Structures are given as C-alpha cells and as structure tokens.
Image (tube, rainbow, N blue to C red):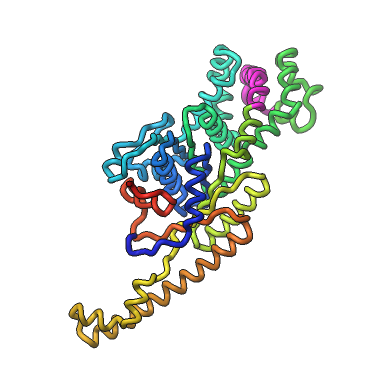
C-alpha cells in the first residue's frame, strides 16, 4: 500500500470525516462483494478514533464484520472491540467501539417487550405460535426489524454514532422500503375491523357473511386442515396485535423521519467494475427518489495510476536499472519491454475506471463527495489490514 500515490480526494475525505464526526447514523449500502462490510467496520473504527462512542451493526449473518474487527463471532449484544485492534497495532482509541450482529428473533422479542402496553400482553404474543412464524417468515420482517433496531439504538442516547452494514443491493432496497410497507399494513382499516369483529363475535368472525369470495374459501380450507382451535389462536393473535398498531405506527413514522433527518447519511460503496457501478446507479437513484440523504460515494479497489516514481524510472530506461541490479543485458531488454507494457496496461485500466466513476458521479451524486480507495495487494480480512484503511477514509495519523 505504501507504494501507491494517494489519490487527490482530500476535500472528499474531509467531508467524510465530517460525517463520521458529526452524524448520528451512517447507513452503509452497496452491492455484494465490493467491500461494504469492510468499509462499515473501518468507519466504525474511524468514529471511535474521533472520540465517539460508536456501534457497528451488521445484518449479514456471515462473519465478515467479526473477522475484520479481529473477532471470531458477534452476537445480538453489543460487544466491545479493543484487544484485537490493539494487537493489530491500532493507535489507542479516544472513544469506544462496539459491534453486534442482528439476531432476528431476539430483535423482534425485544421490540415487542418495549412496545406492548403491559407484560401480560407481551407474554401472550411471545407464546403465540403465529408470532414465531410471522416474525420469521413474513416478507419484509427481516428488513423491518433491522430498521426498528436501528431506530431504537440510535435514539437510545447510548451511542454517539451508529454504523449500519446493510445487505447487498436487492435486500438493501427491501430495507429502504420496509418502513413504508409496515405503515401500509398498520394504516389499513381492515385489520382494525378484523380485530374488533373477532373480539365481539369470537369464531363467528369467520362466517361467510363477514368474509366472502376467495378469502372465505381459503379460510374454509384452513379450517379443514387446522381446526377451530388454531383459528381461534390466530384470532387471538390479531386481537393482541391491535394494541401494538398505534405505538408501531408512531415508531415507524419516527424511523422514516430519522432516515431522512440531518443526523443520518447514506454511504454507497461500489467498485469500478461495470456490474457494481450499475447497482450503485440503482441505489443512488432509489435514495434520491425516496429523499434519503447521500453522504458519500466510496469506490473500492480502484486501480492506481503507475505514479510519478514509476514514470521517472521508465524515463531513465528500465534496462539501466535492471543491469545495475545484475541482470544480463539481453534479459534486461526483454524484461524492460514486459514492464513497459504492464505500466501501459495499468494506466489504460486506470483511465477507463476514472471515466466510469466520473460519469456516475456527474449523473447521480449531485456534488456528494467521492472517496477512492486503491486496490490492495491483500484483502482486508483482519484487524491489522483494517487499520491500514483509515488514512484512505480521511483519518489523521497518530500524533
């Protein structure tokens, strides 16, 4: 890494540093395989280096975040990160760094206990078989509870900065849509009516005069295979949920306000590869359409130009340097030709990448900072390599 010249992104790095030092929530999003989780971990470390009490959350059950932070695993409980970073040679943190991996069931249970009007209602819902199934399998359940957990932690007052590592692009879009989807359900008068009818009529709420057509036939099939007892339990579950409509609606609206607010910024991570840039375009378009604030575009694995040092060597002719190193003249000439071609190819790739990224920046980011991170010889797979990323994100060297 030390042989690469630093790209001229100083203004962008200062802007990113401002987000890390001043915002409450950073949502890191992008396609799979572009280093999104690594950047989320590095940004969390950056925040702690700036003296902030920082929490990094991953939704991905893979261990990439844990490995990047020098750990073997993460749990739903925020875990302090210190020893692994110290062993990696990181400068002492002036703030605190914690990390956690979202556990879907634990997050739902926690939300339910916080939202239910009393302990008895919460206990009944937790014991209901439909709760376990719906919280696990309902479309959007994963994304909604991730949003809710983010809102709860960011608004708790326990953290100065929360960095969220989202799933890849397709799931990230589900994440962005989750609040609106939940509000569409909670604002549906049919559900309130359904709950009221169940409470007043008992099992007779399934009567054909109440539900007609396909819905009625579907319920008849359900009744044949599951029996009245299960339908009664389903009805009880709906009645119990009635008490959660209002608080859940309120919290979901607060979440939407938080995601659009001054304290939040979305960071889109990509690479110069065409498929990754295409997904970045999609994400940037969706962020703009939803009115969600873009903080920066981070481009990983940028091919560096050969640099002035290599240019000077080439100007003096490779052969001379090789001959001084003891290479025979004929071999030096052949090797010099190979090196010249390698430099030309690297410069060509670098120019193509720069043009592609510039086009993306011009069309979609509206002046948001662009931070380029060079292609490294080795992947960032542990805390030691993670520390080496910090200068490229704008962190200052230790005094």
Give the x, y percent position of residue 375.
40, 61
User: Is any part of residue 249 visible from this angle?
Assistant: yes
The residue lying furthest to the front in this view is 399
Q: Is residue 67 left or right of residue 275?
A: left
Judge whether residue 21 is colored magenta: no
Looking at the rendering, the stretch of residues picked out in magenta corresponds to: 221-250
Q: Is residue 363 left or right of residue 108?
A: right
Residue nearer the viewer, 110 or 272: 272
Judge whether residue 230 is colored magenta: yes
Tell me where residue 6 sits by quadrant.
Answer: bottom left
The residue lying furthest to the left in this view is 326
Residue nearer the viewer, 46 or 181: 46
User: Who's the residue at 35% across and 49% down the image?
Assistant: 397
Decide whether the magenta segment is chiefly helix, strand or loop: helix
User: Who's the residue at 28% across and 85% down the image?
Assistant: 333
User: Is any part of residue 228 visible from this angle?
Assistant: no
User: Who's the residue at 50% across and 27% down the image?
Assistant: 157
Counting the numbered discs, the total is 0
């Amino acid at each position: 890494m030390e042989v690469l010249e630093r790209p001229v992104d100083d203004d962008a790095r200062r802007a990113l540093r401002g987000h890390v030092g001043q915002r409450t929530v950073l949502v890191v999003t992008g396609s799979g395989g572009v280093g999104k989780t690594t950047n989320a971990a590095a940004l969390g470390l950056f925040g702690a280096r700036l003296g902030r009490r920082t929490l990094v959350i991953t939704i991905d059950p893979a261990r990439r975040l844990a490995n990047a932070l020098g750990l073997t695993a993460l749990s739903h409980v925020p875990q302090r990160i210190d020893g692994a970073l110290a062993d990696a040679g990181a400068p002492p943190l002036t703030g605190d760094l914690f990390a956690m991996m979202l556990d879907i069931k634990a997050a739902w249970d926690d939300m339910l206990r916080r939202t239910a009007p009393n302990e008895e209602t919460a206990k009944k819902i937790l014991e209901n078989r439909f709760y376990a199934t719906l919280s696990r399998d309902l479309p959007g359940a994963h994304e909604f509870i991730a949003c809710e957990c983010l809102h709860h932690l960011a608004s708790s007052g326990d953290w100065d900065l929360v960095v969220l590592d989202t799933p890849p692009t397709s799931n990230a879009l589900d994440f962005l849509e989750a609040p609106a989807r939940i509000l569409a359900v909670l604002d549906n008068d049919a559900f309130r009516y359904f709950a009221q009818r169940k409470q007043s009529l008992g099992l007779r709420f399934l009567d054909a005069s109440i539900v007609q057509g396909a819905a009625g036939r579907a319920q008849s099939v359900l009744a044949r295979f599951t029996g009245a007892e299960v339908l009664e339990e389903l009805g009880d579950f709906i009645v119990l949920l009635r008490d959660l409509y209002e608080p859940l609606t309120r919290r979901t609206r607060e979440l939407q306000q938080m995601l659009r607010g001054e304290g939040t910024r979305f960071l889109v991570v990509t690479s110069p590869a065409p498929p990754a840039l295409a997904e970045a375009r999609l994400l940037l378009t969706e962020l703009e359409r939803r009115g969600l604030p873009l903080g920066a575009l981070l481009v990983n694995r940028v091919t560096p130009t050969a640099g002035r040092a290599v240019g000077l060597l080439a100007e003096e002719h490779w052969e001379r340097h090789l001959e001084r190193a003891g290479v025979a003249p004929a071999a030096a000439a052949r090797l010099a030709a190979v090196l010249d071609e390698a430099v030309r190819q690297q410069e060509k790739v670098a120019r193509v990448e720069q043009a592609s990224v510039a086009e993306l920046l011009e069309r979609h980011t509206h002046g948001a900072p662009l931070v380029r991170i060079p292609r490294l010889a080795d992947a960032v797979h542990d805390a030691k390599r993670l520390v080496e990323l910090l200068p490229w994100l704008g962190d200052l060297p230790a005094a």
